[in-house]
Image (cartoon, helix red, strand yellow):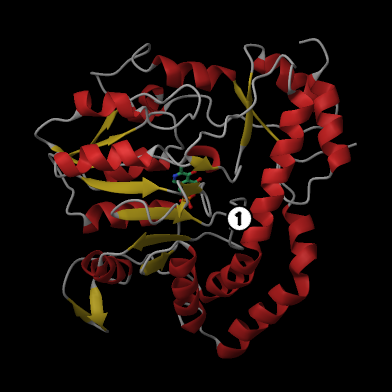
Amino acid sequence: MNVPLVDLKAQYRSIKPEIQAALDGVLESCAFASGPEVAAFEDEFAAYCQNKHAIAVNSGTSALHLALLAAGIGPGDEVITVPFTFVASVAAIYYVGAMPVYVDIHPLSFTMDTTQIEAAITERTKAIMPVHLYGQTADMAPIMEIARRHKLLVIEDAAQAHGAEYRGRRAGSLADMACFSFYPSKNLGAYGEGGAVVTDNAEFSRKIKMLRDWGTERKYEHQIKGYNYRMEGIQGAVLRVKLRHLPGWNEARRSKAAVYGSLLAGSAVGVPVEMPYARHVYHVYAVRTSGRDALQQILAGKGIQSAIHYPIPVHLQEAYREPHYGEGDFPVSEAAARELLSLPIYPELTREQIEYVCAAIGLPV
Ligand SMILES: Cc1ncc(COP(=O)(O)O)c(C=O)c1O
């Protein structure tokens, strides 16, 4: 048996007629850059996120970049985030000329350890950027409370958390702005690159709309220096189709995670913990073991794909090293980078496949 990490082909087969009709509509209209499908997707995605405005862009990284610019963050400013994330969270902070200040992650949720935030705040701090890693939101109530007390903005990195909930509210509605990625393998993935910023703040929304389209509100009148970060029409049309399926797909991911959880109970690997405040949408299903690399080899030998999200925390990445950070500074992140292994998870994964993966994990490592 072969078990891929994700199976985008199976998903495509399940929605092929709807996708082909949507693509045909864009090809007939020739609205390739932005256009009505993108605008309709923005309305639908904002509503899905229980928020007012969604601004579609060409990647999750662009969404983070523009959210930080709209927040007025720039050289000399600091943004508090975590080192255990995909590098884009941190890269975007450098794009605007600001500095990342890291706090470690919580050992069970793998999201920001909220007890460490206050000690990281300085007079240069402008914002906090929690990352909803693997499909589970950070513990947002203490983050928002600290931010409000210190007059800081909060930007959710929700790139992995479409449809995740925190105490009954959706990711995307939990802070001042939220940034999503529609990279193809995400829970809501485009057929190419895509991203969005979601906010209830009309001024941020207006600024981000200008920034993504060369700083204009009227064609060829450039009020501010902007970018070409528009979403393609085809991606808007595909995302509209897929958004309709997202609730069902997230439910399916949750039920696959439950099957893994029951089969792996009592095994040598630690399974993900759904925090009491969270509704996890399992973008990634990462198990924990000190024998991670050996386990990955055993799985590969049985035709089971796995992945490491992420093997090196950002403060130890060559490109992002700073003299004031080094090995041992964020021990929970560093241990997670050594011990977590992502198993196959996607809505079309079968019970037989999960049983096969769990049987392989039962082998001595
Ligand atoms: C946590 C996180 N932030 C940001 C991004 C960047 O998104 P994109 O790849 O769409 O630029 C990703 C994408 O993988 C991510 O996982």
Query: Residue 132: horizontal and vertical position, in percent?
Result: 45, 41
* In this picture, residue 116 sits left or right of residue 74: right
Residue 129 against residue 204 in the figure, above or below: above
Residue 165 against residue 46 in the figure, above or below: above
Question: In front here: 93 or 332?
Answer: 332
Residue 303 at least partly seen: no
Residue 238 at least partly seen: yes
Query: Residue 59: horizontal and vertical position, in percent?
Result: 45, 57
Q: Residues within 10 Å of mark 1 (few under 14, many from 20)?
A: some
Q: Residue at x 68, y 59 (%)?
A: 248
- The residue that label 1 is drawn on is 184
Amino acid on which disc 1 is placed = Pro
Q: Residue at x 59, y 46 (%)?
A: 281
Query: Residue 97: horizontal and vertical position, in percent?
Result: 21, 43
* In this picture, residue 98 sits left or right of residue 57: left
Q: Residue at x 36, y 51 (%)?
A: 174
Image-quadrant location for residue 9: bottom right
Query: In the structure shown, which secondary structural element does the residue marked by tag 1 occupy?
Result: loop
Query: Residue 127: horizontal and vertical position, in percent?
Result: 22, 43
Image-quadrant location for residue 256: top right
Q: Quadrant of the C terminus?
A: top right
Q: Residue at x 36, y 23 (%)?
A: 104
